Amino acid sequence: QPDVSGIVDPTWRAAWREAAAGAGAQHPPQGSPALRAALAEHVRVARGTAVDPDAVVVTAGVREGLQLVLTTLSRRAGRPLRVVVEDPGYPALRRVVAALGHEVRPVPVDGDGLSVELLDHEPAADVVLVTPGHQYPLGGAMPVARRLALVGWARAHGAVVVEDDYDGELRFTGEPVPALAALDRRGGEDDGVVVTLGSFAKVLAPGIGIGHALVPDGLRPDVLALRGDLGSPVPATVQDALAQYLDAGALRRRTGRMRRRYRARRDLAVAALSDLPEARLRPMDGGLHGVVELLGADAEREHAVVDAAARAGVLVAGMGDYWADPGGLVVSADLPRHGLVIGLGSPHLERGLRRLRPLLAGAGSSAR
């Protein structure tokens, strides 16, 4: 969960007050023109991705955007889709794919993200779902060479890459890596193959319930036709408030504050969990979470540590839950099969880390 403290300031109040004054407004299914223009400018500045406002579709968040894209592509194909997902990866997005009746195909990642060369060992995929800016949960950013290879593979195989721009703006070191869509040429005969999904759940608050999809020209008419059939799930007042907030430059300022705040929390976690003989905190270049490897542990020990942490009042997730294929291929010896995923957003982080440290002191011993 993100840290939502400080979000309600004079700019936030003014944006919602002005939006509420026009509560009778209606916007087209694609979204408010003013908001789409503000979002296009936002992704240009924050994510190094130049798009026309017409390429922006307002969504209710990443999962709703994924449903919209997969349903559009399935209608085109006239059948369920074959969807490659990262392993380990974001369980909630895998569940969206499965809930819509599509085939989930896990492909292992390494320290640089999805292993593109392994795609050729799978039956032809229709969609590849990736988190290249900040792989979830391991945290690495996909290098440019691999991004180009992924886009090239998708073009060669007639596939669509769906980019979940997870935590792309919340980097602690250097500037945010441009979105994958920045490498994807658009328009003309060489149309784009990348759909980028984003939301404001992490830099603002999950309850805002708004996001965006950047849709290439060739796919957009069908996406908009489906959006027209379904209607927009985002109220006009919410769209207008966010447009006002973006136009005021408030999101850019808040994102800068959140980077500094999470960097300090990352440093706090590093200091609290260093020098443990049975556990290792993986490097964190950004985001709201970290991964603690349980060295030498098995699934039973992982579950025991998660349960012990819960009894101590600290909620963490087991790393095993993020693997789609728990017994499958691991392409890098550096990847943890067992460990903990910890959040950095709690206002009680320091207290939680103090309680967690002794539980990790012998985390791998029972597996030996």
Image (cartoon, rainbow, N blue to C red):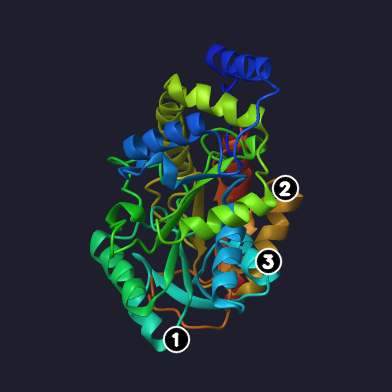
Q: Is residue 176 above or below residue 196?
A: above
Q: Is residue 359 visible?
A: no
Q: Is residue 169 visible?
A: yes
Q: Is residue 265 left or right of residue 30?
A: left
Quadrant, the N terminus: top right
Amino acid carrying mark 1 in the image: Glu
User: In this figure, which residue is indicated by the disc labeled 2?
Assistant: 312
Counting from the top left corner in percent of width and height, residue 288 is at: 51, 44
Q: Nearer the viewer, mark 3 or mark 2?
A: 3
Counting from the top left corner in percent of width and height, residue 53 is at: 41, 39
Quarter holding residue 66: bottom right
Q: Is residue 249 above or below residue 28?
A: above
Q: Is residue 19 left or right of residue 179?
A: right
Amino acid carrying mark 2 in the image: Ala
Q: Residues within 10 Å of mark 1 (few under 14, many from 20)?
A: few
Quadrant, the C terminus: bottom right
Q: CA distance from mark 1 to mark 3?
A: 32 Å
Q: Secondary structure at mark 1?
A: loop
Residue at image position (61%, 52%) is 227
Counting from the top left corner in percent of width and height, residue 2 is at: 58, 38
Out of 91 and 73, give the one closest to the viewer: 73
Q: Secondary structure at mark 3?
A: helix
Q: Secondary structure at mark 2?
A: loop
In the rendered structure, are the residues bearing label 2 and label 1 in contact, judged by CB atoms less than 8 Å apart?
A: no
Amino acid carrying mark 3 in the image: His
User: In this figure, which residue is indicated by the disc labeled 1?
Assistant: 122
User: In this figure, which residue is indicated by the disc labeled 3?
Assistant: 303
Q: Nearer the viewer, mark 1 or mark 3?
A: 1
Which of the marked residues, 2 or 1, is nearer the chain's N terminus?
A: 1
Q: CA distance from mark 2 to mark 1?
A: 44 Å
Q: Residues within 10 Å of mark 2 (few under 14, many from 20)?
A: few
